[in-house]
Image: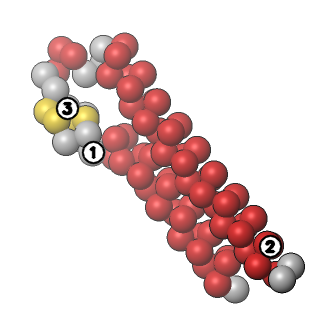
């Protein structure tokens, strides 16, 4: 039961962290105000996507690690 709660919380945190750049005001990217003419710049858009995928991958890998550690504890 604790494993399920832990995985759910980690997944929830990972999703929230990954989508934060898309939830805030368009001109604010990672706490920095960007001028309107640069919002649709390819670099800014690709940076948002990169951070999104890094955040999701980090938390999925962490979830897998928690699962593997839990299985190794049961085998002792």
Residue behind mark 3 = 27
Q: Secondary structure at mark 3?
A: loop
Q: Residue 9 — which label?
A: none
Q: Going by the image, does 72 lie left or right of 20?
A: right
Mark 2 Cα shell of 10 Å, populated few (<14), some (14-19), many (≥20): few
Give the answer, above or below, for where 13 lies relative to 56: below
Q: Residue furthest bottom?
A: 1
> Along the line of sight, which residue is nearer the eye, 7 or 33?
7
Residue drawn at 32 percent across, 22 percent down: 44
Marks 1 and 3, Cα distance to the nearest angstrom?
A: 8 Å
Query: In the rendered structure, which disc, 1 or 2, sits on the residue that comes first in sequence?
Result: 1
The quadrant holding residue 28 is top left
In this rendering, which labeled residue sits more in front, label 3 or label 2? 2
Residue 43, x across and y down, in percent: 34, 16
Q: How is the image coloured?
A: secondary structure
Taking the spot 43% from the left edge, 36% from the top edge, the residue there is 51
Of the image marks 3 and 2, the number of the one nearer the N terminus: 3
Which numbered tag is attached to residue 71?
2
**Mark 1 vs mark 2, CA separation in Å:** 39 Å
Q: Quick one: SS at disc 2?
A: helix
- Quarter of the image for residue 76 reads bottom right
* Residue 35 position within the rendered picture, expressed as x and y whole percent measured from the top left: 13, 22
- Mark 3–mark 2 Cα distance, whole angstroms, equals 45 Å
Q: Nearer the viewer, mark 1 or mark 2?
A: 2
According to the picture, the residue beneath numbered tag 1 turns out to be 24
Q: Is residue 43 left or right of residue 54?
A: left
Instruction: Using a 10 Å C-alpha cutoff, classify the residue at mark 3 as few (fewer than 14 neighbours), some (14 to 19) or many (20 or more).
Output: some
On screen, residue 35 above or below 9: above
């Amino acid at each position: 039961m604790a494993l399920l709660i832990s995985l759910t919380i980690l997944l929830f945190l990972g999703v929230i962290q990954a989508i934060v750049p898309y939830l805030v005001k368009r001109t604010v990217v990672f706490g920095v105000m960007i001028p309107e003419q640069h919002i649709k710049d390819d670099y800014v858009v690709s940076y948002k996507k990169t951070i999104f995928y890094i955040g999701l991958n980090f938390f999925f890998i962490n979830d897998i690690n928690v699962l593997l550690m839990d299985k190794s504890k049961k085998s002792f």
